[in-house]
Amino acid sequence: MKEVIIIKKKGRGAHAAHHGGAWKVALADFMTAMMCFFLVMWLVSQKETTRSAIAAYFRDPGVFATTSAGGLTNAGPGVLEGAGGVAYAALVEETNRQRLQKTAERIEEEIAKAVGLKGLGKQVDVQVTGEGLRIELQDSDNSMFFDSGSARIHPEGERVLALIATELDRLARPVVVEGHTDSRPYGSAGDYSNWDLSADRANAARRVMESGGLSAALISAVRGFADRRPRILNDPMDARNRRVSIVVPLDTRKPQGR
């Protein structure tokens, strides 16, 4: 009896159900939902000005433009008028404030961990105010930064200024250097006063920072205020009034009007 050979053929799509792509669609939906969830959580944690600015962007994206450096900028004359412009200005201000705050934190960290400078932490005041980033190197009764009546900076002061210069150059924003004195009269000859001393100390700080890496192009002003802007108002003779202030103004970029 002749043997019967049975041949079974499987269709080409026999394993299609096992290797289907339906799970990829489900995963993509899940990832999209998670992204939306985290975006909502992030928005909830932001300040009102930031949320308003983001909302304004989606209402009118043309109000916003970006520079090659990734920053926000005015897209053209008149483009910032109206509610969208107000929101844009708020977003720019908040973004710049956050950048200044991060720079302030890095400066404090660098001074705190620098060998030989830990004792100067209390004499270097770093704050972000409504004016912008303000760094003040305050003298003490021991004259830690300058010799009494002199514009010569001590080595410790030079190291602090070099650390500050590195961070401000990375920030790449205009810098103002100010000099201040206490109310003690400078000498008796009258040919050199606290006005001269404060200006000379500000220029000495500028030179040290430029040597420390701060681009000279970022220096927008050097000012000497003598004793006219004391830090300790109720004691004009206080050593803390003898100081050098380094200011990075806050760029608010207010909307243009007609």
Image (spheres, rainbow, N blue to C red):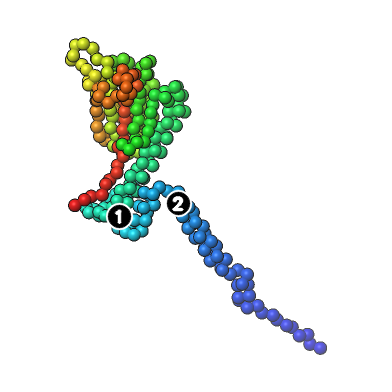
The image shows residue 189, relative to residue 21, as above or below, that is: above
| Label 2: few (<14), some (14–19) or many (≥20) C-alpha neighbours in 10 Å | few
| Nearest to the observer: residue 108 or residue 9 | 108
Residues under labels 2 and 1: Cα distance?
20 Å
| Residue located beneath label 1 in the image | 84
Q: Residue at x 22, y 21 (%)?
A: 195
- The residue closer to the viewer here, 174 or 94, is 94
What residue sits 53% from the left and 66% below the top?
25
Mark 2: secondary structure: helix
User: Residue 174 location in percent, x, y?
Assistant: 28, 37
Query: At label 1, which amino acid type do we have?
Result: Gly
Position of the N terminus, as image quadrant, is bottom right
Q: Secondary structure at mark 1?
A: helix
Sequence order check: which comes first, mark 2 or mark 1? 2
Residue 83 at x, y percent in the picture: 29, 54
The answer to whether residue 200 is visible is no
Rendered residue at 28%/52% (across/down) = 85
Against 173, residue 198 (above or below) is above
Residue lying at the far bottom of the rendered structure = 1
Q: Which mark is residue 44?
A: 2
Rendered view: 65 above or below 109: below
Residue found 38% across the figure and 15% down from its top: 142
Q: Is residue 83 left or right of residue 43?
A: left
Tell me the quarter of the picture where residue 209 sits. Answer: top left
Question: Which three-letter amino acid code belongs to the residue tagged 2?
Answer: Val
- x and y percent of residue 151 in the render? 28, 19
Quadrant of the image occupied by residue 155: top left
* Disc 1 crowd, CA 10 A, few/some/many (<14, 14-19, 20+): many
Q: Quadrant of residue 54?
A: bottom left
